[in-house]
Amino acid sequence: MKITFAKTTDAPIIHDLMIQAFMEYENEVPPSSALEETVQSVLTALDDGEQAIICSIDDEPVGMVRFRVKEDYVYFYRLAVIPIKQGQGIAKKLLNSLEMYAIEQEKPMIQCKVRMAVPKNIALYHSLGYRIFEEEIVYKLNGFALNVVAMVKQV
Protein backbone atom coordinates (compact mmCIF):
# COMPACT_ATOMS: atom_id res chain seq x y z
CA MET A 1 0.00 0.00 0.00
CA LYS A 2 1.27 3.41 -0.94
CA ILE A 3 -0.10 6.62 0.59
CA THR A 4 0.34 9.94 -1.21
CA PHE A 5 -0.94 13.46 -0.75
CA ALA A 6 -3.12 14.49 -3.66
CA LYS A 7 -2.33 17.25 -6.11
CA THR A 8 -4.99 19.27 -7.91
CA THR A 9 -4.35 17.13 -10.99
CA ASP A 10 -5.64 14.16 -8.95
CA ALA A 11 -9.19 15.59 -8.86
CA PRO A 12 -10.47 13.01 -11.42
CA ILE A 13 -9.00 10.15 -9.35
CA ILE A 14 -10.47 11.51 -6.12
CA HIS A 15 -13.86 11.93 -7.79
CA ASP A 16 -13.81 8.44 -9.30
CA LEU A 17 -12.90 6.75 -6.00
CA MET A 18 -15.58 8.74 -4.18
CA ILE A 19 -18.32 7.89 -6.67
CA GLN A 20 -17.44 4.18 -6.66
CA ALA A 21 -17.50 4.05 -2.87
CA PHE A 22 -20.58 6.20 -2.30
CA MET A 23 -22.79 4.42 -4.87
CA GLU A 24 -23.91 2.14 -2.04
CA TYR A 25 -25.78 5.16 -0.63
CA GLU A 26 -27.62 6.14 -3.83
CA ASN A 27 -30.91 4.67 -2.56
CA GLU A 28 -30.66 6.22 0.91
CA VAL A 29 -33.10 8.98 1.80
CA PRO A 30 -31.61 11.38 1.07
CA PRO A 31 -28.84 9.94 -1.11
CA SER A 32 -25.33 11.02 -0.22
CA SER A 33 -24.48 14.45 -1.58
CA ALA A 34 -21.12 12.95 -2.57
CA LEU A 35 -22.93 11.51 -5.59
CA GLU A 36 -23.79 15.03 -6.78
CA GLU A 37 -20.16 16.15 -6.85
CA THR A 38 -18.25 16.55 -10.09
CA VAL A 39 -14.58 16.50 -11.00
CA GLN A 40 -14.87 20.29 -11.22
CA SER A 41 -16.34 20.60 -7.71
CA VAL A 42 -13.50 18.48 -6.32
CA LEU A 43 -10.95 20.59 -8.22
CA THR A 44 -12.54 23.79 -6.93
CA ALA A 45 -12.39 22.46 -3.36
CA LEU A 46 -8.71 21.52 -3.77
CA ASP A 47 -8.00 25.00 -5.13
CA ASP A 48 -9.78 26.41 -2.07
CA GLY A 49 -7.60 24.72 0.54
CA GLU A 50 -9.06 21.24 0.73
CA GLN A 51 -6.52 18.42 0.79
CA ALA A 52 -6.72 14.70 0.17
CA ILE A 53 -4.73 11.54 0.75
CA ILE A 54 -4.87 8.72 -1.78
CA CYS A 55 -4.07 5.07 -1.13
CA SER A 56 -2.83 2.94 -4.03
CA ILE A 57 -2.06 -0.75 -4.34
CA ASP A 58 0.21 -1.75 -7.23
CA ASP A 59 -0.11 1.82 -8.58
CA GLU A 60 -3.92 1.53 -8.71
CA PRO A 61 -5.83 4.05 -6.56
CA VAL A 62 -8.16 2.18 -4.18
CA GLY A 63 -9.14 4.74 -1.56
CA MET A 64 -8.94 8.34 -0.45
CA VAL A 65 -9.94 10.76 2.26
CA ARG A 66 -10.58 14.48 1.85
CA PHE A 67 -9.87 16.91 4.66
CA ARG A 68 -9.34 20.47 5.78
CA VAL A 69 -6.95 21.78 8.40
CA LYS A 70 -8.85 23.99 10.84
CA GLU A 71 -7.50 26.23 13.59
CA ASP A 72 -7.46 23.54 16.32
CA TYR A 73 -8.14 20.29 14.46
CA VAL A 74 -8.24 18.40 11.18
CA TYR A 75 -11.72 17.73 9.76
CA PHE A 76 -12.11 14.82 7.34
CA TYR A 77 -14.94 13.77 5.07
CA ARG A 78 -15.76 11.63 2.07
CA LEU A 79 -13.55 8.76 3.24
CA ALA A 80 -13.86 6.35 0.33
CA VAL A 81 -12.57 2.87 -0.46
CA ILE A 82 -13.69 1.17 -3.66
CA PRO A 83 -16.14 -1.66 -2.89
CA ILE A 84 -13.89 -4.51 -4.06
CA LYS A 85 -11.17 -3.40 -1.60
CA GLN A 86 -13.33 -2.65 1.44
CA GLY A 87 -12.56 -4.59 4.60
CA GLN A 88 -8.83 -4.79 3.86
CA GLY A 89 -7.63 -2.07 6.24
CA ILE A 90 -7.37 0.68 3.65
CA ALA A 91 -9.65 3.12 5.52
CA LYS A 92 -7.65 2.52 8.69
CA LYS A 93 -4.39 3.14 6.81
CA LEU A 94 -5.76 6.39 5.37
CA LEU A 95 -6.91 7.61 8.78
CA ASN A 96 -3.63 6.59 10.39
CA SER A 97 -1.81 8.69 7.78
CA LEU A 98 -4.17 11.58 8.48
CA GLU A 99 -3.47 11.29 12.21
CA MET A 100 0.28 11.43 11.57
CA TYR A 101 -0.27 14.53 9.43
CA ALA A 102 -2.37 16.16 12.18
CA ILE A 103 0.44 15.55 14.66
CA GLU A 104 2.96 17.08 12.24
CA GLN A 105 0.67 20.12 11.89
CA GLU A 106 0.36 20.34 15.69
CA LYS A 107 -3.40 19.80 15.57
CA PRO A 108 -4.47 17.82 18.66
CA MET A 109 -7.74 16.48 17.27
CA ILE A 110 -9.35 14.93 14.21
CA GLN A 111 -13.08 15.29 13.65
CA CYS A 112 -15.69 13.96 11.26
CA LYS A 113 -19.45 13.72 10.91
CA VAL A 114 -21.25 10.46 10.20
CA ARG A 115 -24.83 9.66 9.27
CA MET A 116 -26.51 7.92 12.19
CA ALA A 117 -28.16 5.65 9.62
CA VAL A 118 -24.74 4.13 8.77
CA PRO A 119 -23.75 2.32 11.97
CA LYS A 120 -20.89 0.42 10.28
CA ASN A 121 -19.05 3.72 9.74
CA ILE A 122 -19.65 4.80 13.34
CA ALA A 123 -18.34 1.39 14.47
CA LEU A 124 -15.24 1.75 12.27
CA TYR A 125 -14.38 5.11 13.78
CA HIS A 126 -15.10 3.85 17.31
CA SER A 127 -12.68 0.97 16.70
CA LEU A 128 -10.00 3.52 15.82
CA GLY A 129 -10.49 5.55 18.98
CA TYR A 130 -13.03 8.13 17.86
CA ARG A 131 -15.87 9.08 20.20
CA ILE A 132 -19.19 10.77 19.60
CA PHE A 133 -19.25 14.27 21.03
CA GLU A 134 -22.40 15.68 19.45
CA GLU A 135 -25.59 14.65 17.70
CA GLU A 136 -27.25 17.03 15.31
CA ILE A 137 -29.76 17.31 12.51
CA VAL A 138 -28.40 18.64 9.22
CA TYR A 139 -30.97 20.14 6.88
CA LYS A 140 -30.19 19.51 3.22
CA LEU A 141 -31.08 21.92 0.42
CA ASN A 142 -33.75 19.50 -0.78
CA GLY A 143 -35.54 19.81 2.58
CA PHE A 144 -34.45 16.48 4.03
CA ALA A 145 -33.36 16.36 7.64
CA LEU A 146 -30.34 14.14 8.24
CA ASN A 147 -29.38 12.82 11.69
CA VAL A 148 -25.60 12.85 12.11
CA VAL A 149 -23.08 12.37 14.88
CA ALA A 150 -19.91 14.38 15.18
CA MET A 151 -16.95 12.25 16.21
CA VAL A 152 -13.52 13.24 17.52
CA LYS A 153 -10.19 11.61 18.27
CA GLN A 154 -7.34 13.11 20.25
CA VAL A 155 -4.01 12.50 18.51
Image (cartoon, rainbow, N blue to C red):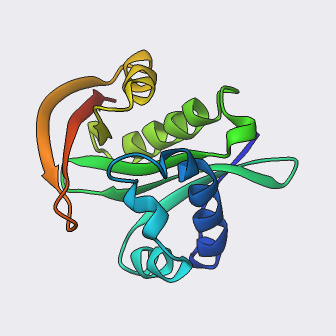
Q: Which of 4 and 138 is in front in this view?
A: 138
Tell me if 111 is positioned left or right of 17 in this view.
left
Please tell me how many numbered marks the rendered image carries: 0
Residue 71 visible in the picture: yes
| Rendered residue at 66%/26% (across/down) | 87
Residue 105 visible in the picture: no
Q: Position of residue 73 (x, y in %)?
A: 25, 46
Q: In this view, does 148 lie above or below 72?
A: above
Tell me if 11 is positioned left or right of 72 in this view.
right
Q: Position of residue 18 (x, y in %)?
A: 56, 57
| Rendered residue at 12%/32% (across/down) | 134
Q: Quadrant of residue 127?
A: top left
Q: In this view, does 39 lie above or below 51?
A: below
Q: Is residue 129 above or below residue 35?
A: above
For this orientation, the residue located farthest to the right is 58
Tell me if 78 is positioned left or right of 74 in this view.
right
Query: Which quadrant does the N terminus fall into?
Result: top right
Q: Where is residue 116 in the image (x, y as percent from the top left)?
A: 28, 32
Query: Which quadrant does the C terminus fall into?
Result: top left
| Rendered residue at 44%/69% (across/down) | 36
Q: In which quarter of the image is residue 2?
A: top right
| Rendered residue at 12%/44% (across/down) | 137
